[in-house]
Amino acid sequence: MGTENTGRARGISKRLWIPAGILGAVMAGATAASYFLLLKVSAPKETDYGSYRFHIAIISDDTDTSFWDDVYDGAVREGARYGAYVEQVGDGLADDFSMEDAINIAIYEDVDGILIKPSDGEGIRRMIDKACSHQIPVITMQKDVPDSKRQGFVGINDYFLGQEYGRQVLKIADENTRLVTVLFPGSSFNQTSRDWFRQGLGNTVRLDGIEFDFQIIWDDKGLNNAEDMIHDIAEGNISQPDMIICLDQVITQSTCQLLRDRGLSERIRVIGSYISDDILNGIEQGYIDSTITVDPEAMGRMSVEALMTYKRYHMVSYYTEVDTMLVDRISAARYREESRNEQEE
């Protein structure tokens, strides 16, 4: 490897292990010791930085899901093609820290780019803009922050996502279908996202007699609100839907389990989101009708590709769409087999 590449890699190593006293002076509003600990623990113990030309930070607040594991794996594989080390900021830490902290760490490390699945809130927009002001390009993943200075977005438009779910509702609806409840995860579907999804869903499902009830699931990754809602359905406090659309992995899994516990799974059909072993089991056992997911490996791969395109040409597509995939009882076994084969490769 040339001198330029080796020097760049050594710079990565130095930034990760800089003494706490200097770090405290740089990181305004945080103690030196706390940020030093975050950097030290998040750095891989045995990484040959001399083999990398670029350093990419990848940031999310749901790194404990199988979906995100696949996103990260896709990013790492694609990064290797460009000689880029993809660091999942905070990986291995026992305690959670904020997304703002993670972006600050990436800025301090002077990474070559940031891939981020943003949470909702004005603070995230400001932090993305802060990274861009430090000449660090940012690609948003899965959810966009269109009013920020980010360079590009890789995922699926919420309007198109609503259309996808609408087509599946039409596919499984019968003459008795009257009410469809949609469960939005409050942390990742803000008001704008919900409005676009509702438009896509409503413009696709135009059958007379089918109504939609939209609910926001807050707190503890969907467990609290979902449990309250299923309890109210079981007790007859609210109208019983014929279908429930769940718009993230955790809500899908918890709703399926709650319906089974309450004896409602045979009366209410569930259309879920994303893929996990629990969701595939639910589909195969008939507790979940189907799930709609974007290809997580492809999203990680395409995000790195978008970032490296910007690094090379200083321009990139404003929006890069990742294809969605429907997994139902017929295709679940095939999906398992394909996933198994990919892992063996």
Image (spheres, rainbow, N blue to C red):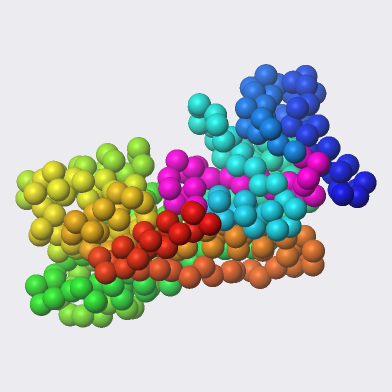
List x then y, in percent, for residue 161: 41, 68
Q: Is residue 327 visible?
A: no
Q: Is residue 345 visible?
A: yes
List x then y, in percent, for residue 335: 37, 63
Q: Quadrant of residue 59?
A: top right
Residue 96 versus residue 128: which sits nearer the camera? Answer: 96
Residue 3 versus residue 225: which sits nearer the camera? Answer: 3
Q: Is residue 160 left or right of residue 256?
A: right
Name the residue rendered at 91%, 50% in the picture.
2
User: Is the residue 78 above or below the residue 221 in the image?
Assistant: below
User: Is the residue 292 above or below the residue 76 in the image?
Assistant: below
Q: Quadrant of residue 262?
A: top left
State the count of labels.
0
Name the residue rendered at 19%, 45% in the picture.
258
Furthest residue in direction right, as rendered: 3
List x then y, in percent, for residue 209: 15, 76
User: Is the residue 186 above or below the residue 171 in the image?
Assistant: above
Residue 118 versus residue 133: which sits nearer the camera? Answer: 118
Q: Is residue 100 left or right of residue 52?
A: left
List x then y, in percent, for residue 143: 51, 57
Residue 10 versus residue 105: which sits nearer the camera? Answer: 10
Name the residue rendered at 79%, 64% in the picture.
312
Q: Is residue 223 left or right of residue 121?
A: left
Boundaries of the magenta span: 49-70
Q: Is residue 288 magenta?
A: no
Q: Is residue 186 left or right of residue 177?
A: right
Name the residue rendered at 13%, 71% in the picture.
177
Furthest residue in direction left, as rendered: 236
